[in-house]
C-alpha cells in the first residue's frame, strides 16, 4: 500500500508536459506542437521550426538585421520572415521526435540564468512544447548548444527532418498556430526514424 501511495505521489509531482508526452507513446496527440526558435541577435538573424501532431512542419527564417533581434510579444521576430517553407512528415517521424524530447526531458530548464529574453547581441535557442493545456519553454545560450549536447540534438533532428521531408508549400503563409486546422489534401509523407546517441 505504501508503494502504491508513493507511486501516486511521485506521478502527481511530474511536470504536466511530462505526463502529456508519456501518454503519447503510440500516437502523436492532435494538439501537439513543438516550436524550435533561434535568435542570433541583429548580426545573425532568426529561425523558427514548428512541428505539429499531424506532421505539418513549417520553417521560417529571418535575415540578419534589427527585426530578427527585436521579438514581438509572442516571442517571434517582429518583421515578416524572409523565407517560409512547409513540409509534411508522417506520424512515425513525429513520434520519433516525441521520444527524443522525452529522453532529453525537453520540458526541464537546465540553464542557470533566469532572464527569459536575450539582449540584441546575445543568441539563444528555445524549445517550446504544447499538448492541450500543458506548455513548457526551455532555452540555452547559442554558444552552449554544442557544449551541452542537449538541445542541439533536437535542432539536429529537426534539420535532418527538413532535409529529408518533401516540401509541400512554397508560400509565405504563417506557421501553423492551432492544432484543429484542416490539413492539406493528400500531401506526400516521410517516415523518419530519429535515434539518440
Image (cartoon, helix red, strand yellow):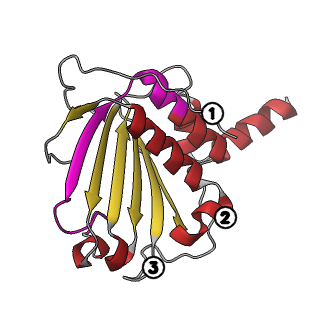
- How crowded pointer 2 is (Cα within 10 Å; few <14, some 14-19, many 20+) is rated as few
| Residue lying at the far front of the rendered structure | 163
| Residue receiving disc 2 | 147
> Disc 2 versus disc 1: distance between alpha carbons?
20 Å
Label 3: element kind: loop
Residue 27, position as x, y percentages in the image: 48, 21
**Magenta segment, which residues?**
73-96
Residue 81, position as x, y percentages in the image: 20, 59
* Between 113 and 83, the one nearer to me in the picture: 83
The magenta stretch spans residue 86: yes
* Marking on residue 122: 3
Residue lying at 18% horizontally and 48% vertically, measured from the top left? 174
Q: Quadrant of residue 37?
A: bottom left
> Disc 3 versus disc 1: distance between alpha carbons?
31 Å
Which is nearer the N-term, disc 3 or disc 2? 3
Label 1: element kind: loop
Which is nearer the N-term, disc 2 or disc 1? 2
- How crowded pointer 1 is (Cα within 10 Å; few <14, some 14-19, many 20+) is rated as few
* Marking on residue 195: 1
The magenta stretch spans residue 147: no
Please say if 162 is above or below 82: above
Q: Is residue 175 visible?
A: no
Which is nearer the N-term, disc 3 or disc 1? 3
Residue lying at 53% horizontally and 35% vertically, measured from the top left? 98
Quadrant that contains the C terminus: top right
Residue 106, position as x, y percentages in the image: 57, 49
User: In this image, 98 relative to 131: left or right?
Assistant: right
* Between 24 and 132, the one nearer to me in the picture: 24
Residue lying at 14% horizontally and 48% vertically, measured from the top left? 172
Amino acid at each position: 500500500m505504501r508503494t502504491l501511495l508513493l507511486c501516486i505521489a511521485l506521478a502527481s509531482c511530474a511536470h504536466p508536459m511530462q505526463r502529456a508526452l508519456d501518454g503519447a507513446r503510440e500516437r502523436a496527440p492532435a494538439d501537439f506542437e513543438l516550436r524550435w526558435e533561434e535568435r542570433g541577435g541583429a548580426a545573425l538573424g532568426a529561425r523558427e521550426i514548428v512541428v505539429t501532431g499531424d506532421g505539418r512542419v513549417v520553417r521560417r527564417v529571418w535575415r540578419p538585421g534589427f527585426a530578427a533581434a527585436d521579438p514581438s510579444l509572442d516571442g517571434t521576430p517582429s518583421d515578416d520572415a524572409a523565407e517560409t517553407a512547409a513540409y509534411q512528415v508522417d506520424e512515425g517521424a513525429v513520434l520519433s521526435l516525441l521520444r527524443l524530447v522525452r529522453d532529453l526531458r525537453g520540458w526541464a530548464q537546465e540553464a542557470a540564468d533566469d532572464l527569459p529574453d536575450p539582449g540584441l547581441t546575445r543568441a539563444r535557442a528555445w524549445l517550446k512544447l504544447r499538448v492541450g493545456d500543458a506548455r513548457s519553454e526551455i532555452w540555452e545560450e547559442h554558444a552552449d548548444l554544442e557544449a551541452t549536447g542537449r538541445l542541439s540534438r533536437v535542432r539536429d533532428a529537426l534539420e535532418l527532418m527538413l532535409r529529408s521531408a518533401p516540401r509541400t508549400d512554397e508560400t509565405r503563409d504563417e506557421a501553423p498556430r492551432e492544432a484543429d486546422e484542416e490539413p492539406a489534401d493528400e500531401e506526400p509523407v516521410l517516415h523518419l526514424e530519429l535515434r539518440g546517441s
